[in-house]
Amino acid sequence: MVLQRVSLLTIGAFQLPVLRSFYKGLGWEETEISSDDYAVFKTAGVLLSLFPIEELAKDAGIEINHSIESYRPVTFAINVNEPEDVDSTIEQIREAGGKILREPSDAFWGGRTAYFADPENNLWEVAWNPSAVFDERGGMISF
């Protein structure tokens, strides 16, 4: 069974500073992992991240429409406990009919990652992050 765990939501940002400013304006707190090129906000049980849309598309191996008025890609993440869990989770998703966009591979940031699309082409990442910390419910509390 694939873990029933949504731990990180990533929005592909056309204008990261504008989007970051909006969420800060809501009073949302950024985490210490944020940088000039990436923003991560604490939410109740799930982290919300903002990542440049071109980099998100490149990482997932897809092409994007460069219009801010077009469909906005969002990546949902299932973070797993061990690096080999990325591979086994992708296999389970493949068996369930998921479209594998990027096979499991080691990531430049030290983890392991893969991408798939659900039947309506919603973009998901399966990732193992060596520094991820989960609460007793399996909710990600930091990475």
Image: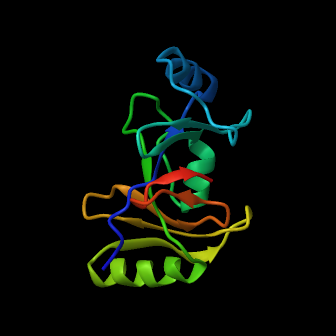
Relative horizontal placement of residue 67, taking residue 30 as reference (left or right): left
Whether residue 73 is situated above or below residue 77 in the rendered picture? above
Q: Is residue 57 above or below residue 67?
A: below
**Residue at the outermost front position:** 136
Single out the residue that lies furthest toward the top: 25
Q: Quadrant of residue 61?
A: bottom right
Colour scheme employed for the rendering of this structure: rainbow
Q: Quadrant of residue 6?
A: bottom left
Q: Nearer the viewer, residue 50 or 47?
A: 47
Residue located at (73% from left, 36% from top): 35
Q: Position of residue 23 (x, y in %)?
A: 50, 23
Name the quadrant of the N terminus: bottom left
Q: Is residue 81 above or below residue 109?
A: below
Residue 128: x %, y % from top left: 58, 69
* Residue at 43% across, 61% down: 138
In this view, the residue in front, 63 or 125, is: 125
Count of labels in the image? 0
In the drawing, does residue 135 fall left or right of residue 33?
left
Q: Residue at x 46, y 17 (%)?
A: 26
Q: Position of residue 58 (x, y in %)?
A: 61, 55
Percent across and percent down for residue 16 are 61, 29
Residue at x-position 56% and y-position 27%: 29
